[in-house]
Amino acid sequence: MDWKAFIAAIVGSLAWPIVVLSLLFILRKQLVALAERLQEFSLGGAKATFEKQLETARKEAEKLPPSSPSPDEIPDDQRIVPLTDEKKFLRLANEFPEAAITEVYKDIEGILFRIGDILGIQRTSADRIMNELYERREVDENARDLFHTLRRARNLSAHGKGDRRVSPGEALDYRDHSGRLMTSLSFVLGKLQAAADIKKARGS
């Protein structure tokens, strides 16, 4: 074997490892997603992944300003949400925690849709409205990430069965984490509504 053949053999032997490493780098995000899907099947399905998303939501929520006081801390004459509604939610969380989570997420969507109305964005996707708020720097990446985490957790909560169902305590945790996001979004809503009212008054 002459030196040219020797070099060609060396290059050939190194080519495949380089190709494999390049593919792993390019497909790293897809591989991470695949690993998460495998975790769902090996650690209890959607329940395990829901718990992971709930823990992520907790960490993300801690980066946002505190939400409103808990219902038990609000005097009766200062309540926006009647105590009867709070009791209804607690009952729903106890009997159908998945439905309670869905109701909380609908409240988040409701605020986003109202913001979308002001911005002239159709009520087709809460995701689109949140991303638009982030692009406009009305919310930071912590609020954006928390929203997407809560959305994924809501979707996962519907797939638990039997002893892998979401628990009432997890439904309450979900509401607590959502509270900080709704506080931030409510502030944005008020700000945009005030600006829209001023613009309208000047135009009239």
Image (cartoon, rainbow, N blue to C red):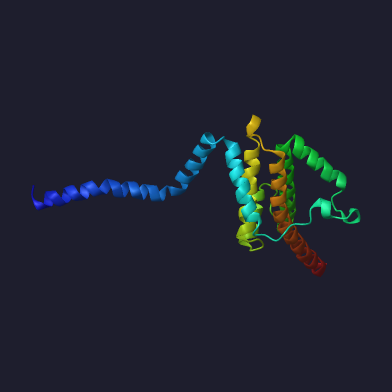
Picture coordinates of residue 108 (x, y %)? Answer: 72, 50
Residue 165 lies, with reference to residue 111, above or below; the image says above
Instruction: Give the answer, above or below, for where 196 lies relative to 28.
Output: below
User: For the C terminus, which image quadrant?
Assistant: bottom right
Image coordinates of residue 146 in percent, x first then y, are 63, 53
Vertical side of 45 occupied by 33: above or below: below
The residue positioned 33% from the left and 46% from the top of the image is 20
Q: What is the residue that sits farthest to the right in this orientation?
A: 77
The extreme top residue here reads: 162
Name the foreground residue: 140 vs 72.
72
Image point (19%, 49%), residue name = 10
Question: Which residue sits at x=72%, y=39%?
Answer: 168
Horizontally, residue 204 falls left or right of residue 3, namely right
Q: Determine whether 2 is above or below 133 in the image.
A: above
User: In this rendering, would 5 be left or right of 132?
Assistant: left
The quarter of the picture where residue 181 lies is bottom right
The image shows residue 117 at horizontal and vertical percentages of 74, 54
* Image location (x, y in percent) of residue 53: 60, 46
Count up the numbered dots.
0
Point out the residue furthest to the left here: 2
Residue 161 visible from this viewpoint = no
Residue 54 lies left or right of residue 8; in this view the side is right
Q: Residue placed farthest to the bottom in the image?
A: 202
Residue 198: tell me if it is visible. Answer: yes
